[in-house]
Image: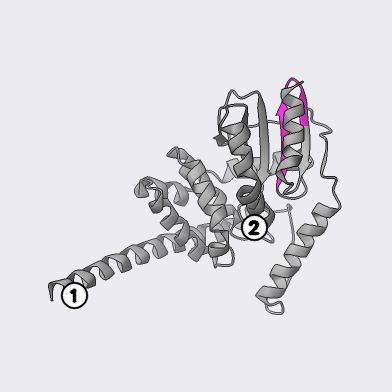
Amino acid sequence: MSSDKAELDQDNHKNKIIKKATFNGLVFGIIILVGISAFFAGSYTANMNSNHISDEDLEDAIAKLELKLLQNQLPTQKAALPAKISADNDPIIGNPDAAITIIEFSDFQCPFCARFHVQTLPSIMEQYIEQGKVSLVFRDFPIQNIHPNALPAAVTAECANEQGRFKEMHDILFEKQNEWNNQETFLAVSLFIQYADNINLDQEVFESCINSGKYIDEIRKDLEDGRDYGVTGTPGFFVGNDEIGYVEIKGAQPFDSFKKVIDAQLDA
C-alpha cells in the first residue's frame, strides 16, 4: 500500500514539473512569437501556406533548398572582405588563447548544423580543441522563416552560457534536435527547460533569463555580422586568426576539409 502511495506521489511530482515547464514555455513562446516579426523584419521572407503543405512536404522542401544552397557554393575558399572576422563576445569552446579560431555561424534547428556537430566536431575536439591548438566561437545565425524554433533555441544556449554550461546545452540541442524540431514553439521551449534541468542549471535564474529576452539584440548582431561577412546559409565557418587571415568553409564539410585548413594554418 505504501509502495502504491509512493508511486502516486512521484507521478504527481512529475506532473507538477511538466505543468510548470509547459506554463513557462507557453509564456516564453508567446514572447518569442510576438517578437519574431520585429526581430527579422526585412531579413528573410517566406510565402509558404501551411494550410496547403503537409509537414513532410515542407521538411522535404527545406532539405532540398538547403542542399541546393550548399551544392552551389565552393567547399572552401579564401574569405573576401572583411579580412578580420569578429568573434564578438560569443560563447567559446576550448582555449580562448588558442593559435587558431574557428568562428561558426550556426542555426540550432538546421539539420546540416546538427550533422556537423554530431559527425565532425568530435574529431575537431579530440585532435585540436582539447589539445589547446584551436578554439571554436559559436555565433548565432537563425534562419527564422524556415526554422521557427531556432531563435528560442539560441536564447536558451545563451542563457545556459551565463551559468558556464554552454557546451552542455549546445550538445543537447543538436543531439535532440529531432525531438524539438517540429514542435510548436511553446512546446519546444518546455523541452528546453527540461534540458536545463538535466544539466543542473539554476532553474530560477535560467527561466528569468529566457523570459527577459535580453539576448535578442546579441543574436540579432550575430545575424547582421554574418550577413556582412557573406554568410548565406548554415553552417558557415571562418578559420584562422587576425594575423594570417581567415579561410571560409561553407556547409557541413567532413573533418578532412577542416584538417587541411587547420594544419596549413598551424604550420604557417
* Closer to the camera in the image, 156 or 4: 4
Quarter of the image containing the C terminus? top right
Compare residues 56 and 211 and report the one nearer the observer: 56
The residue to which callout 1 is attached is: 4
Magenta stretch prevailing secondary structure: strand
The x and y percentages for residue 173 are 54, 53
**Residue positioned 78% across, 61% down in the render:** 65
Kindly tell me whether residue 56 is visible in this rendering.
Answer: yes
Numbered tag placed on residue 37 in the rendering: 2
Mark 1, secondary structure of its residue:
helix
Residue farthest toward the bottom in the current orientation of the protein: 52
Frontmost residue, 255 versus 96: 255
Identify the amino acid type marked 1: Asp
Q: Position of residue 27 (x, y in %)?
A: 45, 60
Horizontal placement of 68 versus 173: left or right?
right
Q: Distance between the residues labelled 1 and 2?
A: 50 Å
Residue 96 drawn above or below residue 1 = above
Residue at point 62%, 61% (across, down): 148
Q: Residue furthest left?
A: 1
Residue 225, compared with residue 16, is above or below; it is above
Q: Which residue range is magenta in the image?
A: 235-246
Q: Position of residue 244 (x, y in %)?
A: 76, 22
